Image: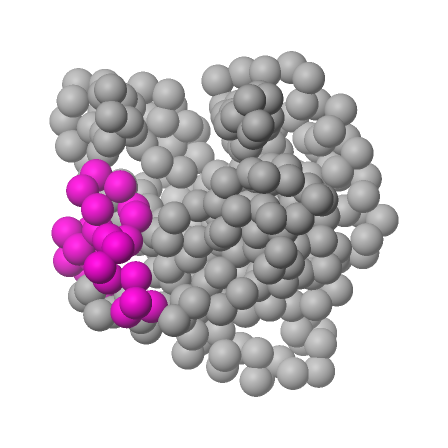
């Protein structure tokens, strides 16, 4: 199989051992540039899945979700046979798109705290507690696709090996109970238990990591923006449209004043 170039066995072993992998030049740059152009043209119309931050007292886009529903180019690429085959190679199962988002990080933009995806308790519209992403599937894999060069200076993502998370246990409950209450964030006192690696990517490169891999990103200290597409895949459910369930729950999740009961991304 040519998906992992000439190091199939080595790369597959690395992913199985560590839970993440970088693949260089997986997509052609011309397709990435087409997606970027299309997405920028769509940012003028806001909806419930647009999120902003203030940078030097100016309102700037921080994140857009459900991107593939208004960007045909991104959906075609992210859900291509090439991508799905790669994920099946890594996870040994048929996976489908669960959720997607486009993270912006303009110069001066903030990063994200160290966290473990999907591991948190949240309350639905009836204020009943739910178990993070485990409500939807038992396993997830994230695909990181840079639309602009991503490096340490402009706030690239840092990923830790999945085995570091085992220090918190192996079950959803044991891991979640070790995190900051009602969030996927790692407590400050526990961050030194994780060894994070910077994931610097050129346009066309991708990174994939299992949801058990802790990760974070720094602020953008450069004078250039950093735009990254994140797509999360999960095992296919023949009976339920779990993507639809997730976004419906996200809109209806109970959000208190401290933002601690919201269904996190």
Q: Quadrant of residue 2?
A: bottom right
| Coordinates of residue 206 in the picture (x, y in percent) | 64, 59
Residue 252 lies, with reference to residue 86, above or below; the image says above
| Coordinates of residue 264 in the picture (x, y in percent) | 35, 36
| Coordinates of residue 214 in the picture (x, y in percent) | 37, 59
Q: In the image as oriented, which residue stretches furthest toward the right?
A: 30
**Is 172 colored magenta in this rendering?**
yes
Residue 30 lies, with reference to residue 24, above or below; the image says above
| Coordinates of residue 231 in the picture (x, y in percent) | 54, 46
The foreground one among 160 and 111 is 111
Residue at image coords 49%, 69%: 197
Left or right of 237 in this view: 183? left
State the quadrant of the N terminus: bottom right
Left or right of 46 in this view: 215? left
Q: Quadrant of residue 207?
A: bottom right
Residue 47 lies, with reference to residue 132, above or below; the image says above
The foreground one among 189 and 67 is 189
**Is 108 colored magenta in this rendering?**
no
The foreground one among 18 and 53 is 53
- Specify start and end residues of the magenta stretch as a single range: 170-194
Q: In the image as oriented, which residue stretches furthest toward the front?
A: 56
Residue 235 visible in the snapshot: no
Residue 73 visible in the snapshot: yes
Residue 241 lies, with reference to residue 214, above or below; the image says above
Residue at image coords 32%, 73%: 163
Left or right of 33 in this view: 214? left
């Amino acid at each position: 199989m040519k998906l992992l170039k000439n190091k199939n066995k080595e790369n597959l072993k690395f992913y199985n051992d560590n839970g993440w992998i970088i693949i260089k030049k997986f997509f052609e740059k011309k397709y990435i540039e087409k997606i970027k152009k299309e997405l920028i043209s769509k940012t003028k119309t806001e909806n419930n899945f647009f999120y902003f931050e203030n940078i030097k007292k100016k309102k700037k886009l921080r994140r857009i979700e459900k991107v593939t529903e208004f960007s045909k180019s991104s959906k075609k690429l992210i859900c291509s046979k090439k991508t799905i085959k790669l994920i099946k190679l890594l996870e040994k199962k048929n996976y489908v798109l669960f959720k997607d988002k486009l993270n912006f990080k303009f110069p001066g933009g903030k990063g994200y705290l160290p966290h473990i995806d999907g591991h948190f308790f949240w309350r639905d519209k009836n204020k009943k507690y739910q178990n993070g992403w485990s409500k939807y599937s038992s396993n997830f894999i994230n695909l990181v696709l840079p639309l602009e060069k991503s490096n340490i200076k402009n706030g690239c993502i840092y990923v830790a090996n999945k085995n570091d998370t085992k220090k918190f246990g192996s079950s959803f409950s044991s891991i979640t109970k070790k995190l900051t209450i009602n969030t996927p964030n790692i407590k400050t006192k526990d961050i030194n238990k994780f060894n994070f690696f910077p994931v610097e990517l050129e346009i066309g490169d991708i990174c994939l990591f299992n949801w058990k891999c802790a990760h974070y990103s720094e602020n953008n200290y450069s004078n250039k923006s950093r735009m990254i597409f994140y797509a999360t895949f999960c095992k296919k459910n023949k009976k339920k449209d779990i993507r639809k369930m997730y976004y419906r729950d996200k809109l209806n999740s109970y959000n208190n004043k401290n933002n601690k009961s919201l269904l996190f991304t």
